[in-house]
Structure formats: structure tokens, C-alpha cells
């Protein structure tokens, strides 16, 4: 999904009013230890760490998909931070003094920009007021702990606060894990941007070698 811009109102639950469920780590050294999952807005000091997190999180899926599932350029990611209309949320596990980044979400409530590839009339004609989810990422080492569910709950809460009626996001057709996750949570396919490829017979740009007569006859004399 391309970048979405929004005229973001200030209403959003602050950290004190946001639910903070506890999760259990699966690490052998910390089996059974409960940690608190918290959400907060991104800060400038987080930018490099979050960019590294996104590269790690989407590394494998990006190898298997035509379109990058995360912002391709770091410069573009840094530009998003400067745009106050885009909401960037970090999800961290806290245990004592230890804090670990395990999730990231990026969203906006309105389409804007001349190069945006989505059609706003599609949503307007259906009386849909979407919150567009540009990125939703969970650390692969923490799958199955309920982190992705908490991220979606936070996004749904944000959508309700802003008067949005739907969450809209994009997932690659062959990203089966992500599709199972979203379908299980009542996401439905509303349209498709399908990449098609047809194999064609290939030819070399250069012609193959060609046999020609020698300029000299069999006896070494010039041929006529």
C-alpha cells in the first residue's frame, strides 16, 4: 500500500488510558515470565531503531513478494516522521528495567497526494470512512503472543475515536501467514491489485556465429 496522508485530529488515547495486556515470553530462559505490552507514539530518538526493526521484520517476506511490504527507502521513512498527519505507534514489552520493541504501526485517515494510487471515490460511494493502515509489523520472534491482536485493537480504537468506519490495509497474496491473521479477525477482501506475468520466448540480442567462406582457397591462394 502506498503512503496515505491525513488531517489527523489530536484525539487519541494517551498511554495511561490504553490497555496494557500482559504476555508470556517463549524464551527458554524466561519461560513463564509475564511482561507488560505498552503502546506509545514514536519519538525522533526512535527512528534508527525502528528502521532497523522494520528491515528485520520484513526481510523474509520481501524476498518472496513483488512489492516491498515496508517503506523501501530510509529517507522516505524519515519524511513520514516529519508529517504530523501520519500516526506512528511503537509497541514495547516491559519487564523491570528492560524494554524491547516488538511491534510498529503506521496509519492515516485520509488519502492525499497526486501520486496516490488508491481511488477515494471507491470509499465515498460506499459511505466508508477508512483508517488506512500503511504498516503493521510484529517481530517474528514474538509471533503467537497476542501482540498483533493488541495492535489491531489499538488501531480500531483510534478509528473509532476519529469517526472512521473501517480499517483498510494491504497484504501480499502470497503472504499466507498475514492473510490468515487478518481473515481470522474479520478482514475481507474488497479489491485486488494483481501483478500478472507471462513467460515469453527469449532471444539473444546478438546473432549467433555464422560460417562464411575463407578468403583463401584450399591451397592458400586467394579465392575468386
Image (tube, rainbow, N blue to C red):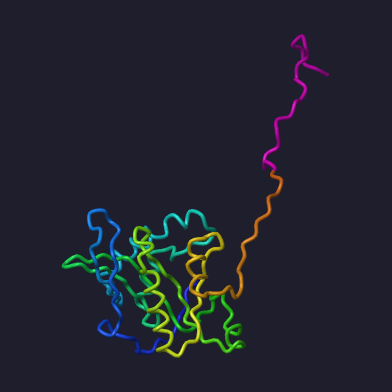
Q: In which image quadrant can residue 25 be found?
A: bottom left
Taking the view exactly as shown, the residue that stands out farthest to the front is: 32
Classified by dominant secondary structure, the portion drawn in magenta counts as loop
In this rendered view, identify the residue nearer to me: 211 or 40.
40
Taking the view exactly as shown, the residue that stands out farthest to the left is: 97
Taking the view exactly as shown, the residue that stands out farthest to the top is: 219
In this rendered view, identify the residue nearer to me: 31 or 224.
31
Please state the horizontal and vertical placement of residue 199, each as a whole percent of the image.
68, 50
* Residue beneath the point at 23% across and 58% down: 30
| For residue 197, side relative to residue 1 (left or right) | right
Please state the horizontal and vertical placement of residue 115, each as a whole percent of the image.
54, 75
- 18, above or below 45, in the image: below
Please state the horizontal and vertical placement of residue 37, each as a whole percent of the image.
28, 72
The magenta stretch is 203-224
Q: In which image quadrant can residue 84 be found?
A: bottom left
- 48, above or below 158, in the image: above
| For residue 154, side relative to residue 40 (left or right) | right
Q: How many marks?
A: 0
| For residue 80, side relative to residue 185 (left or right) | left
Taking the view exactly as shown, the residue that stands out farthest to the right is: 224
* Residue beneath the point at 47% across and 74% down: 3
| 32 magenta-colored | no
* Residue beneath the point at 48% across and 84% down: 110
- 175, above or below 210, in the image: below
* Residue beneath the point at 61% across and 62% down: 195
Q: Quadrant of the C terminus?
A: top right
| 217 magenta-colored | yes
Q: In which image quadrant can residue 188 be found?
A: bottom right
Amino acid at each position: 500500500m502506498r503512503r496515505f496522508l491525513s488531517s489527523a485530529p489530536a484525539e487519541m488515547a494517551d498511554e495511561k488510558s490504553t490497555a496494557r495486556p500482559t504476555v508470556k515470553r517463549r524464551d527458554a530462559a524466561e519461560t513463564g515470565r509475564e511482561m507488560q505490552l505498552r503502546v506509545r507514539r514514536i519519538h525522533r530518538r526512535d527512528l534508527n531503531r525502528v528502521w532497523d526493526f522494520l528491515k528485520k521484520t520484513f526481510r523474509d517476506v520481501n524476498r518472496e513478494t513483488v512489492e516491498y511490504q515496508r517503506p523501501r527507502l530510509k529517507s522516505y521513512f524519515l519524511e513520514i516522521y516529519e508529517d504530523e498527519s501520519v500516526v506512528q505507534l511503537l509497541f514495547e514489552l516491559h519487564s523491570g528495567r528492560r524494554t524491547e520493541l516488538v511491534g510498529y504501526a503506521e496509519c492515516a485517515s485520509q488519502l492525499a497526494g497526486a501520486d496516490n494510487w488508491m481511488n477515494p471515490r471507491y470509499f465515498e460511494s460506499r459511505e466508508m470512512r477508512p483508517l488506512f493502515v500503511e504498516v503493521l509489523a510484529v517481530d517474528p520472534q514474538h509471533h503467537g503472543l497476542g501482540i498483533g491482536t493488541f495492535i489491531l485493537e489499538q488501531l480500531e480504537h483510534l478509528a473509532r475515536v476519529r469517526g472512521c468506519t473501517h480499517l483498510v490495509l494491504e497484504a501480499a497474496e502470497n503472504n499466507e501467514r498475514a492473510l490468515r491473521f487478518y481473515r481470522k479477525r474479520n478482514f475481507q477482501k474488497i479489491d485486488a491489485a494483481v501483478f500478472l506475468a507471462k513467460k515469453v520466448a527469449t532471444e539473444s540480442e546478438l546473432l549467433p556465429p555464422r560460417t562464411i567462406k575463407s578468403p583463401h582457397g584450399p591451397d592458400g591462394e586467394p579465392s575468386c
